[in-house]
Amino acid sequence: MKKSRTAVLMMLLASSMLLTAASPPAQDRTLKVFGNANMDVVIDEEDIEYVQGIIAGTNEETDLADANYDGRIDEEDIAQIELIIAGEETKLTLIDMANRTVTISMPVERVVPAGLKDDFRTLIQLGAADKIVGINNYVKEYAYEKPATYWAPERDAAPELAGLPDVGGYTNPNMEIIASLKPDVVFEYAPIPDVADAIQDKIGVPVVCVQSLQFDFDMLRIMGLITGTEERAVELISYADEKIEEITTITSEIPESDRPRVYGISGTQGVALVTKTWGRYDPINIAGGINVAEEFVTSSGSVMVSKEQILDWNPDIILIHGISPPHAISIEDVLSDPDLQTVNAVKNRNVQYAKYGAIGLDPATCLAECYYFAKLFHPDLFDDLDEEEIGDEILEKFYGVEGLYTNMLDLSDRYRWET
């Protein structure tokens, strides 16, 4: 039996409290839905009491207290909160991941994931693939049209979506095709809110900006709320938190002096781009490593640095973004670079391939990579860990298909332990 909206959101609160000290810095966990009057992470009876206090003049107005988003706070907002609690709201107004305010007619049955790839894979993970009515050309190419040698879990998880209409690129969507599909909501990539505004203005359909931020899980929460799959979002977030805690129970006890210094190469072409590095990448920290570039780049993107900076960081391990051949930057390219011969990772030949992202960051593969890094960074502590088995378990949990991680290993040059 489907749980009430309040029960599900309370479960989200509980799961958010499981985040460990080894996770990324705490984000604003406020549930950014109008009706969350007391600005916590759940809409419940306390929000009704808070609005009553605003009406009575004993509580201060808050940004999200106007539940029906009509510009005033009154008894109608209490009625809207009651509908949200019961899961019976016909309108839902929220602040998306680009800080845009969007009102959606509920329930949502037809969805166009027009963003990079994050929104598409998230809908599959939430069990909402049957709501997708169109896909963008990145998804069509990288999930369905690439040869079988290109690993794409979406291909195995939702093969039936391959023939859906192509709605164009995430930066240049085909407005006419999107409009013809009559979606209830369109999802777009959060870093390009202007494109979302253009779609919304052109076709009159609400557009919600989302983006995967690794283990912040805001995208899962927002998309689960919109598509009526909150229970599945809670399930995945709770599962991920438990898996992270399984690792950090061990790695949190490792003193900083015993944590390897890790440098990640995010370049995609030529040895010269050995100087392009990832900033934040949560699995490195969770697995007991020190991401040397993390303070240099505070976002989840990448930046160019100098070779002098790499020499100064002197990483113990170098990770190369990209696991499948042909490699634009190979392990041998790094090991033979004359400028890097004094770096510990090169001297000790401790250079490996890592998945990182692939057309956006997938929390499922990021979670599996936590185990890979843990065994790579601390082989003695994780000697008994079968990371291939746990990787298969994680991806099956998110995608519902067996053997996805093993298939990824079969198609890649990533380090593989003998079993």
Image (tube, rainbow, N blue to C red):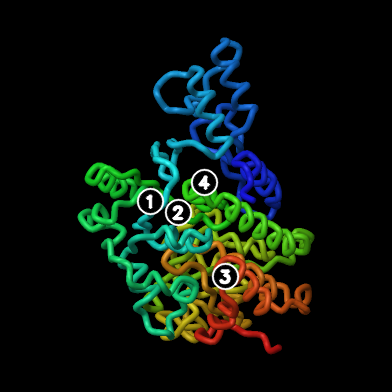
Distance from Cα at disc 3 to Cα at disc 2? 22 Å
Amino acid type shown at disc 3 = Gly
Distance from Cα at disc 1 to Cα at disc 2? 8 Å
Instruction: Tell me which numbered mark, 3 or 4, is placed earlier along the sequence.
Output: 4
Single out the residue that lies furthest toward the left. 176
10 Å neighbourhood of mark 3: few (<14), some, or many (≥20)?
Answer: some
The mark lying in front, picked from 1 and 2, is 2
> Which residue does the image show at 37% across and 78% down from the upper left?
270
Distance from Cα at disc 3 to Cα at disc 4? 21 Å
Determine which residue is flagged by label 2: 211
The mark lying in front, picked from 3 and 1, is 3
Distance from Cα at disc 4 to Cα at disc 2? 15 Å
Determine which residue is flagged by label 3: 400
Instruction: Tell me which numbered mark, 1 or 4, is placed earlier along the sequence.
Output: 1
Q: Give the left or right position of residue 28, taking residue 195 as reference.
A: right
10 Å neighbourhood of mark 1: few (<14), some, or many (≥20)?
Answer: some
Amino acid type shown at disc 1 = Pro
